[in-house]
Image (tube, helix red, strand yellow):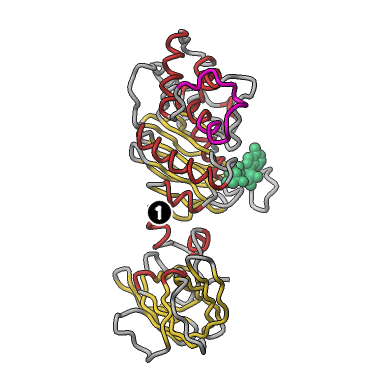
Amino acid sequence: MGRGSLPVLAAGPPLQLQRSWTIAMLRVERLTKIFENSTDQIAGGIREAEFELAPGTFFTMLGPSGCGKTTTLRCIAGLETPDAGVISVDGRALFDGERKLNVPVEQRAVGMVFQSYAIWPHMTVAENVAFPLTVMKHRRYSKAEIGAAVAKALAVVDLDGFEERPAPRLSGGQQQRVALARAIVHEPRLLLLDEPLSNLDAQLRDEMRSELKRLQSKIGITTVYVTHDQSEALALSDQIAVIDHGRIRQLGTPEDIYFRPANPFVARFVGATNLLAGRLVGAANGRGDVEVLGRHTIKCLVPSVIADPASVSVSIRPESIRLVPRAGAASPSGDNRIPGKIAGVTFLGATRRVDVASDGVTLQVTAAADHPLPADGEVDLLFAPERTVALPGKVS
Ligand SMILES: Nc1ncnc2c1ncn2[C@@H]1O[C@H](COP(=O)(O)OP(=O)(O)OP(=O)(O)O)[C@@H](O)[C@H]1O
Ligand SMILES: [Mg+2]
């Protein structure tokens, strides 16, 4: 459906710079936008995305390249017309496929930093930041109003006094902050950030990550953030949606996603993990027993619905496993215990990565650099049932 075919819904009175920040609720229902002409095997885009963000939420869409993150963000911004679904802010529809409502981008009150956050090199910092105000069709701002708004936005990103600096004479991190100031100068209800740190080197990215979190909590703005970097997502977010091939595969807090992944895709995409194929022997109240490696029954969490008990994967994080000298079968602490033999050790500084072979499978274990390892390599792997998760589907 082309953009022109939907009548435009007026979004109400234009925003006033004087008003205080509004902290908005964002609701996305059955959002679908598919590019049939995409060159991928499966037509690209986003399918049936659903989420609701409480005011002030820092929400991250995390997923591999081409999974549909930017498409979703562009639909929220109004830069892309969805095929179907509803997008609403504070209960007012910005887009509704069935009711044929589509509020134009300039009336959506969103601030956006794009994937390649160009700031204009021929302009000063102030001109860059003021730009969204100078192109607004429905309201003309006086010079004084623009000056005040620019100063306020620059103060939020700690660039007070940088107004007259030419854009090329800024560091990467400062340019990033100018892009953020430009996104918030009109006091939007939503902040949409598409991989805003991807242009920065690793150290600066770390610094800007903390900065961004601080800024977001300072102004409390509801934020939709896009990244394919899992550590960024875990560090910043209140809620994360993990997306694969246009579908949300799991929605939850960083702890949910990391410790209670819903499927093998999420377990593998977020953090390193060991996945063992297994068979569900029994489950009740979110816990159960799974037979792995053909002969060991281990206790684990069973947070997801498992349709086929014969086709199960068990996820155990490398740092959740402890290596101890070989002993009897049972563990007094109630931890799972399976035997193995050390197949390789890699020194990583603070930790060592230990590869342990067990019944033809190699498991990765993260051990402290000074953790004693037996000379003959015969060990038991100990891991708590709370850190062992059964997932639907067998690992390939
Ligand atoms: N205008 C378009 N025409 C055709 N296909 C498109 C268009 N825009 C996006 N796609 C396809 O839709 C899919 C999702 O693209 P999108 O840009 O949303 O991915 P992404 O998750 O942001 O990826 P990245 O991490 O690489 O930025 C891709 O397969 C892409 O090729
Ligand atoms: Mg993208």
Name the residue nearer the viewer: 248 or 300. 300
Mark 1 nearby-residue class (10 Å; few <14, some 14–19, many ≥20): many
Q: Quadrant of ligand 1?
A: top right
Q: Quadrant of the C terminus?
A: bottom right
The number of discs equals 1
Q: Tell whether position 295 is magenta.
A: no
| Residue at screen point 43% across, 61% down | 262
What is the x, y in percent for residue 130?
51, 18
Q: Can I make out residue 35 in this image?
A: no
| Residue at screen point 48% across, 9% down | 140
Q: Which residue is mark 1?
A: 254
Q: Vertically, is 248 above or below 123?
A: below
Name the residue nearer the viewer: 271 or 240. 271
| Residue at screen point 53% across, 14% down | 134
- Chain part drawn in magenta: 161-177
Q: Tell whether position 167 is magenta.
A: yes
Q: Can I make out residue 135 in this image?
A: yes
Where on the picture, by quarter, is residue 28?
top left
As drawn, the residue found furthest toward the right would be: 39
Image check: 105 left or right of 92? Answer: right
Q: Quadrant of the N terminus?
A: top right
What is the x, y in percent for residue 288?
35, 75
Check disc 1 and give the amino acid type.
Pro
